[in-house]
């Protein structure tokens, strides 16, 4: 994972000049507080995932991740989405939407919803292309698409807004080589977004591995291993990204906006 | 010595094929087999020997027992009966063993200690090897001579209850049967109750001669909770009750008929301390064998201890006991205690029959059988026997004669033991020495390939192979001497038979020369690499570039290949390997789609390209760039369309974006055409739907459409002559399928007479050969005469077309879409992905390899021998002819990999004018095929006592070996076309 991320992110940043000065130290402190905020935010997200396991057992009978998997998927998706909304929209870490009218906000929100739905459906299509049954287990497949969208598309929507160019910029390895310097990873937040999204995908990808094994375990049923894999990947990404950014904070500089 | 990288790779793969062949020869030892097959009528039994005359006793002796009951308890270990557990839980059996009318033995099972081979061993008396599985391809029934078949031929009525395996092995042999499946391991009561519930009725009826019961419960308990579980005791007690019931029933029957009955209690294999089985530990191979009959009555002070015998001895004993001929392939010897109460003449007769059968088997399998001590002993015993019979017939019985008879019997027993041993070492064990030599050769070639990878990928097409430095020759001779010494030591001390030792000395010496030469080449290459490493490092430093390192696709290709190789260690992943390939190919498509999106939406392609191509390290990128310029120059109309600079907007752009998704959709369709593997094979799929007779019309339309698509796509690169030939050939394919009744012509809805379609198929063969000939001619022309290099490309495409036509003929009609989609995907990838994105040669090669593998499975193949479509070998042939049938079947099975590899050759010759491209591709192809093979044979060696070694790993090993052979052939083809490439600049200079 780390190796992939290194190759992904490394070209996007230039090396920090060695001579320290006041501006740099100021930057560094800013970066440290940013990392702290990021860490807390991620802890909240992890917390929401844990809550989605614990809370429903109070008012749903016989709740367990394996047996009532679909219920858990709904809860998990709901919790993570709401936490993301609260986290990214209330404190506005990216301060991009400064003075926009209400109608603009509404269209933006609607656009986000459409994007979310489109991503759900396209994930569904991808799963079917990957070999998920076409006619049976449609709801299961779709909910897997929803949860994967929750882990990947929702944070993107919150942070970058419905802006495909920005998405491509963030998720391209060679974004740093472009002539126009607008397209670059511009903050810790985008960096961590890369890590969590890719680790969710990788988790879901690895989650498909145990399906052909003949162990006859209940969690080998489609799509449980994949959803669980995606969740683990997401949580792992949430944990890894602040740590990774912290360890590499000397090498990372972001273009100031 | 300088070698082109392609030639080098071809040589390496050829050597590797040799190594794998030696390994396979050691892994699958040839089984001992009687040449007269079991299907033929049994020859009359050998008459009793009589010195100076012929005996009048030439019939088989009468049966010793009128009825026989065999109780086989799965995974019954010897200490469950003879040990403390037996004393505690099986009191009745313990009584029988200790004081009752019985003989008890510890029968040693040979690995693999798995149920089916063990049943075969018990009933045929031979040791089934994996080769037998190949021999009776597709037929689960046991074809070798066995006790059950002999009993059926003798008109005995047999009844079977228990494990379903028996019913599959001996179909139509039992007058009554009830098979239970061993599918649910967690069920250990129901499986056995299903057997026992019949018992009461059957024992009362008595209208049978042989009753076989196979209890599975104990094995299931072992798998679930191990040999120390309390459930074991309960199960043993249940079995004890069953035995008591049978014994008393047999005794009451005996009182009516006054002839003794036989009860056999045996286990097929043991149980390890963890409760599993399959390997060769003492707990797994030692099984009890108890024979109970009133004929074995003994005095109270006669204490018998279980003696150690072989499991294979039971077949001969049963045959003798039931008055049947001993199975021809049996290597067991009669359990003498069973007959020792009989009159001396009868005893000797039985021993003689057994010895004759074993010595015949020895004569047929060992060339120098006369020198075998067992055979000498047998000749001696037979002579003594003859004299004894003469004496016996002349004078009446006396003490002296009895003593002499005992001596003859002892002589016979010695002969039997020696013969049986000689035969069993001939088959039983893995030939570790040959396997090790094979592994060493394969590993050495693999290391050599890996060591030269950086050279091929980074610097040049020609490799320096150091072969003649003085130090090198010294090392070589030293290695050779050491290896020869090892060879002599191993061969003189080995107890079991060994393939390499049985080879002539010259050949074995050649193998040793090869091994030491490879080692020396590796050592010197390594030494040179160490010396060069400093300068190489500098080169790399200077080559450091912002965009050096792996692209996403490159990384995916590397990780995917490594992941696939690692997955081969798990039996489920081997069974479901198609899933791995589908998964990888799909992921590859997604990665490609991401790449297309990025290069088109971000509008950075020109910049990117420049950045890629000025990089000094990658030869591949360079030659691809040259390729692009070259093809632009040669066919301006076609080439510029595919290039991004030529058409940035419009529909091409969208086609490029949609390309990977189209490929994905094609893969999804193909995946639902044929379900393979173990888990998916039984599920309904499109292929089954199409082949069912009620959907013949749909199948016909689909096949016609597919053939049309094949024609449209394949005719593009051909000369006009070949176009016509292709069209006629494809028409012939349809006619052939219609003639043999697979398809219907729209104008003849009713079924007409079905022929073998010989004429139609040969009509197609003519066109196949014609197209292939034209292609070869073009290739040769481009080599000899200086023409523009388009001739070579056309030639390669014609070769490819010929193979496509042959594939269309051989594949079943419901697989024609596979072929059509294969061509479609190749076209899409070529036009919209490889050309615009300019991947380097290594990446393109690996992608071709991946798609080839995926198509191998799309076509319905799996890693199971049973899915091979043998009917491909009979297309257009009147009778079975071995060589063409084998070639056709192999091609029909490996259509996917072969077509994709040939397409790779054509693509590179069309796109890359650089000489190094083809060599580089050949090298990469060889490397990527040999890595799985090398890893797999090491895995198989370490897993050789695995439970699934015969059912899962061995078939896959054969597939891998075959794939390597095909790879070698393809590499030679690559190199041959590469030679033409080399010849070109020369001839130009001459001109």
Image: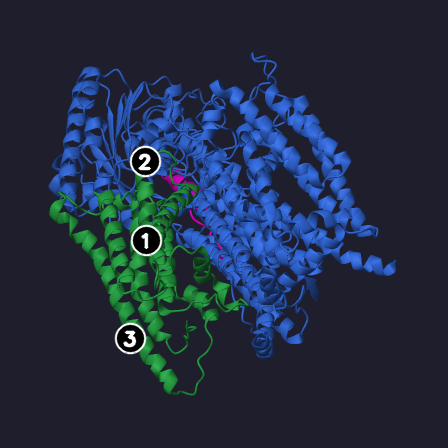
Q: Position of residue B242 (x, y in %)?
A: 17, 29
Q: Nearer the viewer, residue A17 or B572?
A: A17
Q: Position of residue A30 (x, y in %)?
A: 32, 77
Position of the N terminus of chain B, as image quadrant, is bottom right
Q: Label 1 marks which chain's residue?
A: A
Name the colour scheme: by chain
Residue at which label 1 appears: A230
Residue at x 54%, y 49% (from the top left corner): B657
Q: Is residue B420 magenta?
A: yes
**Does mark 3 fall on the same chain as mark 1?**
yes
Residue at which label 3 appears: A33
Q: Nearer the viewer, residue B65 or B828?
A: B828
What mark, if any, has residue B68 been given in the picture?
Answer: none
Left or right of B313 on screen, residue B527: right
Q: Is residue B210 visible?
A: yes
**Does mark 2 fall on the same chain as mark 3?**
no
Q: Is residue A114 above or below residue B818?
A: below
Left or right of B924 on screen, residue B664: left
The numbered mark, 1 or 3, whose residue comes first in the sequence reads: 3
Q: Which residues are magenta?
A: B410-437
């Amino acid at each position: 994972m780390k190796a992939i991320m290194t190759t992904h992110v490394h070209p996007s940043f230039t090396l920090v000049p060695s001579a320290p000065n006041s501006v740099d130290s100021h930057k560094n402190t800013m970066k440290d507080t940013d990392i702290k905020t990021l860490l807390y935010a991620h802890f909240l997200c992890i917390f929401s995932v844990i809550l989605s396991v614990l809370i429903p057992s109070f008012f749903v009978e016989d709740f367990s991740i394996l047996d009532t998997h679909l219920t858990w998927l709904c809860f998990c998706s709901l919790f993570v989405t709401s936490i993301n909304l609260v986290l990214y929209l209330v404190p506005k870490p990216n301060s991009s939407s400064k003075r926009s009218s209400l109608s603009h906000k509404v269209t933006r929100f609607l656009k986000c919803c459409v994007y979310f739905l489109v991503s759900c459906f396209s994930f569904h299509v991808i799963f079917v292309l990957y070999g998920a049954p076409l006619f049976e287990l449609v709801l299961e497949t779709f909910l897997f698409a929803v949860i994967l969208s929750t882990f990947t598309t929702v944070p993107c929507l919150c942070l970058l807004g419905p802006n495909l160019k920005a998405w491509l910029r963030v998720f391209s390895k060679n974004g740093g080589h472009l002539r126009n310097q607008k397209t670059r990873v511009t903050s810790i937040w985008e960096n961590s977004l890369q890590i969590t999204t890719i680790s969710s995908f990788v988790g879901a990808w690895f989650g498909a591995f145990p399906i052909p094994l003949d162990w006859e375990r209940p969690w080998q049923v489609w799509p449980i291993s994949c959803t669980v894999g995606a969740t683990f990947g997401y949580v792992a990404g949430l944990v890894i990204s602040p740590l990774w950014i912290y360890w590499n904070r000397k090498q990372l500089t972001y273009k100031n906006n | 010595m300088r070698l082109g990288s392609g030639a080098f790779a071809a040589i390496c793969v050829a050597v590797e094929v040799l190594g794998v062949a030696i390994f396979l020869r050691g892994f699958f030892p040839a089984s001992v087999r009687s040449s007269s097959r079991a299907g033929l009528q049994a020859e009359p039994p050998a008459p009793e020997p009589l010195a100076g005359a012929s005996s009048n006793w030439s019939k088989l002796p009468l049966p010793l027992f009128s009825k026989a009951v065999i109780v086989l308890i799965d995974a019954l270990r010897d200490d469950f009966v003879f040990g403390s557990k037996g004393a505690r839980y099986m009191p009745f059996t313990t009584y029988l063993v200790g004081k009752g009318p019985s003989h008890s033995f510890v029968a040693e099972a040979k690995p693999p200690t798995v149920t089916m081979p063990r049943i075969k061993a018990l009933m045929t008396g031979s040791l089934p090897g994996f080769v037998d599985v190949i021999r009776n391809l597709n037929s689960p029934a046991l074809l070798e001579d066995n006790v059950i078949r002999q009993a059926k031929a003798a008109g005995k009525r047999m009844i079977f209850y228990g494990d379903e395996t028996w019913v599959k092995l001996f179909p139509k042999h039992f007058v009554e049967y009830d098979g239970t499946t061993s599918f649910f391991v967690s069920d250990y009561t129901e499986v056995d109750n299903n057997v026992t519930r019949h018992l009461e009725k059957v024992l009362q009826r008595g209208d049978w001669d042989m009753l076989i019961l196979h209890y599975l419960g104990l094995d299931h308990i072992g798998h679930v909770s191990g040999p120390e579980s309390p459930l074991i005791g309960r199960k043993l007690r249940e079995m004890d009750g069953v035995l008591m019931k049978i014994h008393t029933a047999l005794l009451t029957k005996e009182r009516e008929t006054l002839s003794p009955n036989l009860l056999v209690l045996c286990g097929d294999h043991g149980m390890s301390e963890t409760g599993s089985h399959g390997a060769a530990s003492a707990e797994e191979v030692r099984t009890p064998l108890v024979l109970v009959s009133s004929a074995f009555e003994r005095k109270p002070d006669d204490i018998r201890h279980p003696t150690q015998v072989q499991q294979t001895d039971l077949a001969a004993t049963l045959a003798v006991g039931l008055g049947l001929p001993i199975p021809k392939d049996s290597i067991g010897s009669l359990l003498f205690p069973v007959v020792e109460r009989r009159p001396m003449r009868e005893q000797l007769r039985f021993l003689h029959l057994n010895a004759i059968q074993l010595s015949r088997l020895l004569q047929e399998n060992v060339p120098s059988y006369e020198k075998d001590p067992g055979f000498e002993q047998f000749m001696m015993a037979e002579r003594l026997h003859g004299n004894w019979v003469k004496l016996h017939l002349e004078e009446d019985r006396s003490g002296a004669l009895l003593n002499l008879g005992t001596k003859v019997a002892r002589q016979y027993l010695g002969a039997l033991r020696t013969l049986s041993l000689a035969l069993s070492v001939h088959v039983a064990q893995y030939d570790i020495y040959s396997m090790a030599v094979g592994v060493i050769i394969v590993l050495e070639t693999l290391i050599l390939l890996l060591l030269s990878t950086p050279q091929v990928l980074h610097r040049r097409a020609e490799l320096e192979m150091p072969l003649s430095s003085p130090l090198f020759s010294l090392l070589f001779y030293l290695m050779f001497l050491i290896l020869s010494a090892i060879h002599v030591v191993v061969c003189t001390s080995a107890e079991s038979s060994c393939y390499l030792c049985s080879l002539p000395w010259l050949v074995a010496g050649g193998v040793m020369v090869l091994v030491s030469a490879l080692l020396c080449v590796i050592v010197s290459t390594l030494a040179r690499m160490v010396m060069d490493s400093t300068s190489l490092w500098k080169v790399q430093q200077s080559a450091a570039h912002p965009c050096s390192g792996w692209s996403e696709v490159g990384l995916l290709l590397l990780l995917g290949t490594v992941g696939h190789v690692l997955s081969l260690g798990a039996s489920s992943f081997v069974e479901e390997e198609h899933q791995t390939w589908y998964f990888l190919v799909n992921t590859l498509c997604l990665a490609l789609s991401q790449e297309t999106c990025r290069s088109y939406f971000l509008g950075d392609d020109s910049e990117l390209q420049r950045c890629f191509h000025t990089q000094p390290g990658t030869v591949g990128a360079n030659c691809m760039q040259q390729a692009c310029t070259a093809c632009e120059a040669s066919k301006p109309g076609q080439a510029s369309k595919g290039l991004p600079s030529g058409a940035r907007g419009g529909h091409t752009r969208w086609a490029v974006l949609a390309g990977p998704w189209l490929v994905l959709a094609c893969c999804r369709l193909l995946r639902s055409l044929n379900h393979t593997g173990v888990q998916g094979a039984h599920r309904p799929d499109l292929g089954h739907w199409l082949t069912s007779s009620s959907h013949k019309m749909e199948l016909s339309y689909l096949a016609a459409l597919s053939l049309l698509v094949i024609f449209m796509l394949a005719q593009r690169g051909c000369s006009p002559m070949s176009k016509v030939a292709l069209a006629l050939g494809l028409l012939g394919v349809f006619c052939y399928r219609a003639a043999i009744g697979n398809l219907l012509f729209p104008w003849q809805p009713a079924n007409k007479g079905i022929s073998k379609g010989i004429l139609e198929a040969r009509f197609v063969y003519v066109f196949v050969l014609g197209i292939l000939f034209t292609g070869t001619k073009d290739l040769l022309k481009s080599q000899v005469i200086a023409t523009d290099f388009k001739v070579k490309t056309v030639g390669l495409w014609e070769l490819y077309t010929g193979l496509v036509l042959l594939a269309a003929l051989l594949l079943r009609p419901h697989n024609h879409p596979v072929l059509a989609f294969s061509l479609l995907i190749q076209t899409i990838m070529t036009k919209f992905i490889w050309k615009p994105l300019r991947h380097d040669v290594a990446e393109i090669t690996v992608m071709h390899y991946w798609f080839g593998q995926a198509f191998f499975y799309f076509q319905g193949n799996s890693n199971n021998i049973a899915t091979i479509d043998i009917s491909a070998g009979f297309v257009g042939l009147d009778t079975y002819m071995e060589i063409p049938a084998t070639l056709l079947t192999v091609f029909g099975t490996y259509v996917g990999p072969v077509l994709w590899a040939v397409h790779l050759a054509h693509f590179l010759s069309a796109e890359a004018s650089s000489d190094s491209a083809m060599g580089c591709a050949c090298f990469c192809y060889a490397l990527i095929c040999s890595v799985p093979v090398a890893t797999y044979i090491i895995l198989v060696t370490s897993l050789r006592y695995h439970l699934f070694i015969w059912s899962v790993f061995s078939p896959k090993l054969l597939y891998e070996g075959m794939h390597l052979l095909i790879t070698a052939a393809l590499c030679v083809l690559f190199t041959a076309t590469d030679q033409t490439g080399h010849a070109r600049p020369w001839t130009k200079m001459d001109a």
